[in-house]
Every structure is written in structure tokens, then in C-alpha cells.
Image (spheres, rainbow, N blue to C red):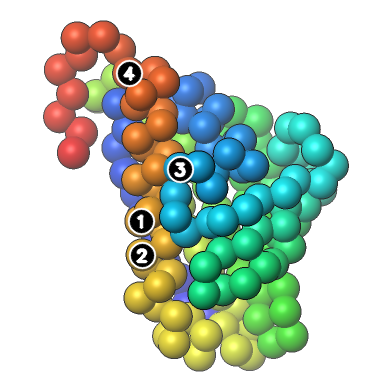
Amino acid sequence: MKAFAVTVPIAAPPGVVWEVLADVEGLPELTPSMTAVVLDPPGALAEGSTATITQPRLGTSTWTVTEFVPGRAFCWRASRPGLTTVAEHIVDADPARGGSVLHLRLTQLGPLGWLIGTVYAGLTRRYIALEAAGIKGAAERNGAPRGADWAGD
């Protein structure tokens, strides 16, 4: 098993962050770590939905939403022989700052999980950081309170 995680404060309310995060088909516009996301069935993300994601240097994988908490979190999985990758996406309120905290975690499991995780560690860390930065930027553009004194970076 190999795990990677990032946590970022965001100067926007949790509902705004969730709107950006849950619009998975819009993620390629926010991050260079994805070139295409196709949701099936089309429309809103939900438990049981699948997303076909194309990423530079990683190709195309189909992810299935295994857990879904509207407004707060979702988890999806992609599997290949010997490897299951689990990606968790969680939005929490940050009452101390009046914004949100985004948690992204990717875990690689199975007989090849540690090996693949080690070989692709640098790329995985970079892609998770790019995704978090893209979501943060979009959420803050869409919902930051005007005139807020934010010290979240």
C-alpha cells in the first residue's frame, strides 16, 4: 500500500468548494493533471456513478464512486490487475477562518500498490497538488467573501 495526501485551506464557504469539486467534468479546466473527464450517467455525481478520466502520462481509467456524502465528500476507485487506486475528496468547514479545508487522499492497494506508488510517487504528488490548487483557485474566485481578511496560504 502507498498513500498520498494534501490538505489545503480555501477562502470560500464549503458549499462553494463542493460545487467546484463535485463538477468532475469541469476539473480538466482547472488542472493540467486531467485532460478529460466523462461522467456516466451524465449529470450530477452520485454513488454508483462512473467517470472515465484521461490523464497525461497515465492514460485513461474508469473510476466508480463508492461513497458519496452530498455537500461534503466522495470516494471513487479504479482497478487494474494487481492494483486498486482509491481517491478520497473531503470538504470541511474551517470555522476559525470562515472558509473551508479541502482534503485529497490517494491510496494504491493490491499486490502492485506499493511498487506502482513508489515508481509514480513524484507524478502522483504533483497531480494531487495541481488538482488541489485548481479547486482552491476556482472556489476562491467563485465564493470568497468580499473584503475578507484571509490568511489561508
- What residue is pinned by disc 4? 144
Distance (Cα) linking label 3 and label 4: 17 Å
Distance (Cα) linking label 3 and label 2: 14 Å
- The secondary element bearing badge 3 is classed as loop
- Amino acid identity at mark 4: Ala
Upstream in the sequence, badge 4 or badge 2?
2
Callout 2–callout 1 Cβ contact below 8 Å: yes
- What residue is pinned by disc 2? 126
- Amino acid identity at mark 1: Ala
Upstream in the sequence, badge 3 or badge 2?
3
Residue 58 falls in image quadrant: bottom right
- What residue is pinned by disc 3? 30
Distance (Cα) linking label 4 and label 2: 25 Å
Q: Nearer the viewer, mark 3 or mark 4?
A: 3
Q: Residues within 10 Å of mark 4 (few under 14, many from 20)?
A: some
Upstream in the sequence, badge 1 or badge 4?
1
- The secondary element bearing badge 4 is classed as loop
- What residue is pinned by disc 1? 129
Q: Residues within 10 Å of mark 1 (few under 14, many from 20)?
A: some
Distance (Cα) linking label 1 and label 4: 21 Å
Q: Residues within 10 Å of mark 2 (few under 14, many from 20)?
A: few
Image position, residue 91 (x, y; %): 47, 36
- Which labelled disc corresponds to residue 10? none
* Horizontal side of residue 15 vs 125, given as left or right: right
The answer to whether one can see residue 13 in this image is: no
Q: Residue at x 69, y 87 (%)?
A: 82
